[in-house]
Image (tube, helix red, strand yellow):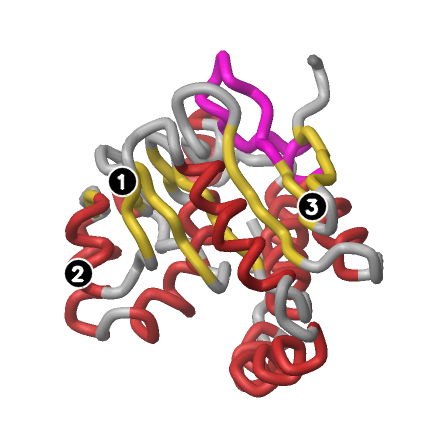
């Protein structure tokens, strides 16, 4: 399985599985391209009622490749502009989705991946899973998605603490402060997410879509102002 993102339909539920398990699903450029492509496809497919995102193996995703982060910190990253466009594109695509998006976080979701999780409507975490945005450890700012969403989901002082230290947020804390919707036993993240998805598919899609549009309208306007910072 060489594809960086596996796509599966479970009835009307589209499951995207990040698939570089030997690298803890670290998001290289090829994976980020595929994620954006599949998010846009899901948004344009009327047969898809719910989107579930998860990771193959031991993690949701370790975030961006460390080599890329080092190059960004040193100002030597030749793919900086494309990475910026891919990151902003994924934010805008997730916010534009009018179907529920569920993150099934196995192991950990770090950096870029923590941003994807933050943009989902429902977040399920395994009991030993954690979230983290450690960009400050590389001398660069926190990701645009986590900086946009975490202060809204918990509160600003807590988001500042998490983002300005780059520390881990374990599942129990994430549930307590509002970065997670539900905690389940390790290994049951996908099953739990699909159970939640089934509840959504039992409802008329129009009400869900309108509710999401109302929630996301100010976020979409904010995301439209994001710009790629020149390297």
Residue 46 position (above or below residue 138) = below
Q: Position of residue 152 (x, y in %)?
A: 34, 75
Question: Which residue is painted at 58% across and 83% down in the image?
Answer: 211
Q: Position of residue 219 (x, y in %)?
A: 53, 78
Q: In this orientation, which residue lies closer to the viewer: 57 or 137?
A: 57
Secondary structure at badge 1 equals strand
Distance between the alpha carbons at the discs numbered 3 and 1? 24 Å
Q: Is residue 139 in view?
A: no
Where residue 53 sits, quadrant-wise, is top right
Secondary structure at badge 2 equals helix
Residue 182 located within the stretch drawn in magenta: no
Where residue 200 sits, quadrant-wise, is bottom right
Mark 1 vs mark 2, foreground winner is 2
Q: Which mark is residue 176?
A: 2
Q: In this orientation, which residue lies closer to the viewer: 135 or 96?
A: 96
Q: Which mark is residue 14?
A: 3
Question: Which residue is painted at 73% across and 39% down in the image?
Answer: 9
Asked if residue 34 lies left or right of residue 175, the reply is: right
Question: Which residue is painted at 25% across and 70% down in the image?
Answer: 154
Query: Which circle's residue, 1 or 2, is located before the other in the chain?
Result: 1
| Mark 3 neighbour density, 10 Å: few (under 14) some (14–19) many (20 or more) | many
Question: Which residue is painted at 48% across and 46% down in the image?
Answer: 193
Distance between the alpha carbons at the discs numbered 2 and 3? 28 Å
Q: Which mark is residue 130?
A: 1
Residue 5 position (above or below residue 205) = above
Distance between the alpha carbons at the discs numbered 1 and 2? 13 Å
Q: Position of residue 137 (x, y in %)?
A: 26, 40
Q: In this orientation, which residue lies closer to the viewer: 61 or 106?
A: 106
| Mark 1 neighbour density, 10 Å: few (under 14) some (14–19) many (20 or more) | many
Quadrant where the N terminus sits is top right
Q: What stretch of residues is rendered in magenta?
A: 17-34
């Amino acid at each position: 399985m060489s594809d960086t993102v596996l796509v599966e339909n479970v009835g009307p539920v589209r499951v995207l599985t990040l698939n570089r398990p030997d690298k803890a699903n670290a998001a290289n450029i090829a994976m980020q391209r595929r994620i954006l492509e599949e998010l846009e496809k899901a948004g344009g497919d009327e047969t898809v009622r719910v989107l579930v995102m998860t990771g193959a193996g031991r993690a949701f995703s370790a975030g961006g490749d460390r080599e890329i982060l080092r190059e960004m910190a040193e100002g030597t990253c030749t793919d900086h502009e494309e990475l910026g466009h891919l990151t902003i594109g994924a934010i805008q695509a997730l916010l534009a989705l009018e179907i529920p998006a569920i993150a099934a976080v196995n192991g950990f979701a770090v950096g870029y991946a923590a941003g994807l999780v933050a943009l989902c409507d429902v977040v399920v975490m395994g009991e030993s899973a954690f979230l983290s945005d450690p960009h400050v450890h590389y001398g660069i700012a926190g990701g645009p998605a986590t900086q946009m969403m975490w202060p809204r989901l918990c509160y600003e002082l807590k988001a500042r603490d998490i983002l300005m230290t780059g520390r881990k947020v374990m599942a129990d804390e994430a549930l307590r402060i509002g970065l997670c919707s539900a905690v389940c036993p390790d290994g049951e993240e996908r099953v739990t997410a699909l159970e939640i998805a089934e509840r959504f598919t039992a409802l008329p899609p129009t009400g869900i879509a309108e509710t999401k549009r109302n929630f996301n309208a100010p976020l979409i306007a904010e995301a439209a102002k994001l710009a790629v910072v020149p390297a």
